[in-house]
């Protein structure tokens, strides 16, 4: 028995059954947008079991935590089916539904686990997306899953109407499949409408189109999943124009001196003489068949010498090289697929790879065949990029691996698992190197300090959302290798990866699917062999539930030049949390090379002292903590702005705004800049929930959900402040900014109209600026101080995703090297006084010598006395007139 490593999880149940309207009035699968959050977790539904419910239907989506003994379930499929039906009928079948409504669609054993799965029907019609399953191991039923629909009812009209209206709607010819189904359509939370629909195949667009019997189009669902491939990447041997190597043409058809032959798996072939032979190769074989959309298949006439390899090269010919590359990469993909899933029958069939399609910067899978586009000035021919071929194969491999009734081809995971398949082949977490003719990754599964997390990073862009599960799988692979060694670690990860492909219908169910795949005794209640590694990898990506806790670094505390960081290590967890083994402070000033300071620990707090610096120095620094898992934690936790600022020395406050009330600054645009108090709703946007100091701060649209609006340009500007009396002037404030990559949304800081700063971008337009704490910001604005200084903060957004925007607090102008100005009311060095009084000369700022009525002989003192007497006389006359 192992220690239990399974926390009760609160995940979403975004089932493939739910349909919602999209922007153009059509209907699409809801899980193609954002996964839904589950409504509740039932604990002790059965003693020792936990369950998660679907938010929209209220039905049980997953049950786990204990087991039911079913002796003989692994060897006897009929017994297993009876036990599965009995368990599901008692504990899972939703309201208004009978177990007899479910038909068996899978009853199979994979890696020692039997999955029994059922598809939902209603009066003999398939209910789209409705399914249930259970899993047995060690003759124990220990997991149940459901995407079944409750209270299914619909009107079944007679006859079928022509599909002309639907064909016009999707603008492509339709082919009737002859299937009639019940289509669930979600109108709102808990509001599900059931419509009878006929299924048509829009072959030209790889869609399933659902049409009401009267001809009204209801919904469409794409069968195509594309890879993003717009960035310029050069990856050498993984890219046609980089370093090249010879790969065996495995099981390829060819002729040798006119006789037909087929190469071996290692590319070998033979002929009946010991002299040179003429070889005519092809790009057709028993594993891979190339379809050249640009013309005839590639061929050549080569000479084979006994004992010497024959190399077929067309490096300078894009269209031919695309065929050769696709054949080689496709063969590698199939070999890896066979290693992961030895019994998958689909791998026995030739894989059709379509190349040189007359489009650019993309590729796609239909769930079976894979398709690649020609080159352009921006993008390499996608068949000539190994990662893209492996990614598209990963889509098809996923689709073919699904256990019907248990898994699903949901857009929230399909891109992520395909990315992981490609990364697992190359051993590189960067995906798509070479697409843009350079060495930059299109997507990165292991970005330092910016791991994608559910639900924070869920977007309507499936490639971005997919980085959540892709990153979790990559982190698991790295941890497995560190613990078990490279080959065993990869094998263990691939076994879990396959379980996710088979049994996870969407992103939120990947964690339980991983545990099921890792289990060895049919009891998740006592943990799994690698349950703690799975919890760690999936938990940091938000997939192990809200109760998951891990070691983290608290924000640094700065006292003068002393910097300290406290490590928050969770207590009471089943799995041992990671421990910090070392910490360093990397710092620099200006453009100098960073210097590392080793930090020392006193209990949970690590600290270091920065060297003394001249007054007014701005230091930039970063904290790097090393864990006993060989991973690192970084502060600040914001890759878009990875360095803290620290101002050393004493400066004089020239002007400050603390936002104790609305300052009434000038605003432009339609966004309301609010001075608001703590608002928990801001958590959804990434905004802070409290001010840096006091109770209020300034930000964009703080009073609703905290998100700025779509497609706007707005700014707010301080009044003009005179700072001309100082030799050095700095603008300082606290910032909490949450905004997309600068290629999408832009935030700037401007002084007197000149831009000092803007948020960053990267090659994939994915470098969102996400502050997770109040950040100190310093700008040297001395060059503007000859005239009054006015500061503006701006924000421009695109029409798509909106985040928290600007949050500002404690804005100040501070000065150093004060110039001696007599009469400004500030006592400068060398001045005896600087106020309007009888004993202060406001011309020289020196004290007037006063001997009890006799003035000083100083002409300046005399003039001061005369001015004072005139002032008194003026006040007296004025008072008499009143």
Image (cartoon, rainbow, N blue to C red):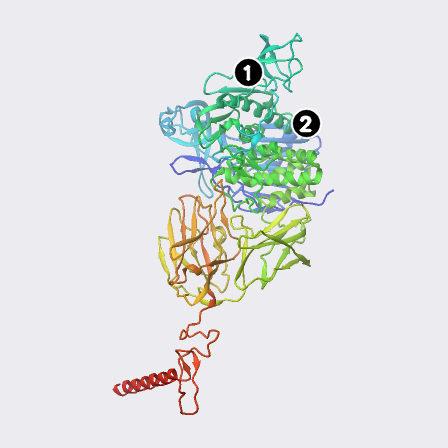
Residue marked by disc 2: 76
Task: Report the front residue among 611 and 112.
Answer: 611
Within 10 angstroms of label 2, few (less than 14), some, or many (20 or more) residues? few
Mark 2 vs 1, N-terminal side: 2
Secondary structure at badge 2 equals loop
Could you say where residue 611 lies in the image, as x and y percent from the top left? 61, 60
CA distance for labels 2 and 1: 47 Å
The numbered dot on residue 469 is none
Q: Tag count in the figure?
A: 2
Could you say where residue 567 lies in the image, as x and y percent from the top left? 64, 55
> Could you tell whether 658 is left or right of 111 in the image?
left
The numbered dot on residue 282 is 1
From where the camera sits, is residue 257 visible? yes
Q: Is residue 400 above or below residue 610?
A: above
Asked where in the image residue 517 lies, by quadrant, the reply is: top right
Quarter of the picture holding the C terminus: bottom left
Mark 2 touches mark 1? (CB < 8 Å): no
Could you say where residue 333 lies in the image, as x and y percent from the top left? 59, 27
Secondary structure at badge 1 equals strand
Within 10 angstroms of label 1, few (less than 14), some, or many (20 or more) residues? many
Could you say where residue 541 lies in the image, as x and y percent from the top left? 58, 44
Residue found at the far right of this picture:
1
The residue sitting at 58% across, 54% down in the picture is 587
Q: From the image, state whether disc 2 or disc 1 is nearer to you.
A: 1
Q: Is residue 294 above or below residue 848?
A: above
């Amino acid at each position: 028995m192992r220690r239990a490593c399974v926390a009760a999880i609160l995940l979403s149940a975004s089932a493939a059954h739910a349909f919602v309207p999209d922007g153009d009035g059509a209907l699409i699968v809801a899980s193609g947008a954002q996964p839904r959050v589950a409504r509740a977790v039932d604990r002790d539904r059965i003693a020792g079991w936990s369950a998660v419910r679907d938010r929209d239907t209220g039905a049980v989506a997953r049950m786990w935590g204990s087991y039911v003994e079913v002796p003989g379930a692994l060897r006897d499929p009929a017994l297993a089916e009876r036990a599965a039906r009995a368990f599901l009928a008692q504990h899972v079948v939703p309201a208004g539904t009978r177990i007899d409504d479910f038909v068996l669609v899978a009853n199979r054993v994979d890696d020692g686990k039997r999955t029994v799965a059922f598809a939902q029907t209603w009066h003999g019609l398939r209910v789209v997306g409705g399914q249930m399953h259970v899993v047995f191991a060690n003759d124990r039923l220990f997991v149940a899953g459901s995407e079944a629909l409750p209270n299914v009812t619909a009107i079944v009209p007679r006859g079928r109407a022509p599909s002309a209206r639907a064909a016009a709607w999707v603008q492509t010819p339709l082919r009737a499949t002859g299937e009639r189904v019940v289509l669930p359509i979600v109108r709102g939370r808990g509001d599900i409408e059931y419509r009878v629909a006929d299924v048509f195949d829009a072959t030209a667009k790889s869609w399933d189109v659902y049409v009401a019997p009267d001809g009204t189009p209801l919904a469409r669902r794409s069968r195509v999943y594309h890879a993003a491939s717009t960035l310029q990447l050069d990856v050498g041997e993984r890219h046609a124009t980089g370093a090249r190597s010879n790969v065996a043409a495995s099981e390829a058809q060819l002729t040798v001196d006119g006789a037909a032959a087929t190469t071996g798996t290692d590319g070998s072939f033979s002929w009946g003489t010991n002299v040179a032979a003429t070889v005519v190769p092809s790009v057709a074989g028993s594993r891979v068949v190339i379809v050249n959309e640009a013309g005839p298949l590639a061929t050549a006439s080569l000479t084979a010498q006994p004992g010497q390899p024959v190399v077929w090269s067309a490096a300078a010919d894009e269209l031919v090289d695309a065929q050769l590359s696709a054949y080689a990469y496709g063969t590698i993909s199939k070999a890896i697929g066979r290693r992961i899933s030895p019994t998958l029958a689909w791998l026995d069939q030739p894989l059709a790879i379509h190349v040189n399609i007359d489009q650019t910067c993309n590729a796609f899978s239909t769930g079976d065949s894979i398709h690649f586009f020609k080159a352009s000035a921006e993008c390499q021919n996608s068949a000539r990029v190994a990662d893209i071929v492996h990614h598209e194969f990963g889509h098809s491999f996923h689709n073919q691996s699904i256990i019907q009734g248990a898994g699903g081809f949901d857009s929230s995971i399909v891109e992520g698992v395909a990315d992981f398949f490609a990364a697992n082949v190359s051993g590189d977490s960067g995906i798509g190197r070479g697409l843009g003719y350079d060495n930059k990754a299109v997507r990165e599964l292991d970005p330092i300090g910016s791991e994608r997390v559910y639900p924070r990073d869920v977007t309507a862009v499936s490639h971005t959302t997919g980085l959540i599960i892709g990153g979790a799988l990559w982190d698991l692979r790295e941890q497995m290798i560190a613990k078990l060694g490279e080959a065993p670690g990869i094998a263990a990860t691939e076994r879990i990866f396959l379980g996710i492909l088979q049994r996870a219908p969407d992103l939120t169910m990947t964690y339980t699917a991983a545990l099921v795949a890792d289990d060895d005794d049919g009891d998740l209640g006592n943990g799994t062999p690698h349950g703690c590694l799975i919890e760690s990898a999936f938990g940091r990506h938000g997939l192990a539930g809200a109760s998951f806790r891990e070691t983290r670094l608290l924000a640094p505390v700065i006292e003068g030049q002393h910097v300290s960081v406290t490590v928050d290590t969770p207590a009471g967890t089943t799995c041992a949390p990671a421990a910090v083994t070392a910490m360093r402070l990397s710092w620099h000033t200006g453009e100098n090379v960073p210097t590392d300071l080793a930090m020392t620990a006193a209990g949970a707090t690590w600290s270091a002292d920065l060297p003394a610096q001249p007054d007014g120095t701005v230091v930039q620094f970063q904290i790097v903590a090393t864990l006993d898992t060989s991973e690192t934690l970084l502060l600040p936790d914001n890759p878009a702005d990875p360095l803290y600022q620290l101002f050393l020395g004493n400066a004089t406050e020239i002007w400050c705004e603390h936002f104790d009330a609305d300052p009434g600054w000038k605003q432009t645009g339609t966004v309301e800049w609010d001075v608001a108090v703590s608002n928990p709703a801001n958590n959804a946007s990434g905004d802070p929930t409290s001010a840096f100091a006091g109770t209020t701060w300034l930000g964009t649209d703080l009073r609703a959900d905290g998100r700025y609006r779509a497609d706007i340009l707005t700014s707010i500007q301080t009044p003009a402040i005179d700072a001309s009396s100082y030799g050095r002037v700095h603008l300082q404030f606290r910032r909490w900014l949450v905004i997309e990559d600068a290629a999408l949304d832009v935030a700037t800081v401007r002084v007197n109209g000149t831009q000092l700063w803007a948020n960053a971008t990267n090659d994939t337009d994915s470098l969102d600026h996400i502050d997770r704490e109040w950040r100190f910001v310093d700008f040297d604005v001395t060059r503007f101080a000859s005239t009054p200084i006015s500061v503006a903060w701006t924000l421009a957004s695109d029409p798509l995703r909106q985040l928290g925007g600007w949050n500002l607090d404690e804005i100040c102008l501070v000065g150093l090297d004060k110039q001696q100005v007599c009469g400004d009311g500030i006592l400068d060095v060398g001045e005896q006084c600087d106020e309007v009084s009888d004993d202060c000369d406001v011309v020289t700022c020196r004290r007037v010598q006063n001997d009890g009525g006799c003035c000083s002989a100083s002409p300046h003192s005399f003039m001061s006395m005369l001015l004072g007497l005139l002032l008194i006389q003026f006040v007296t006359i004025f008072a008499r007139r009143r």
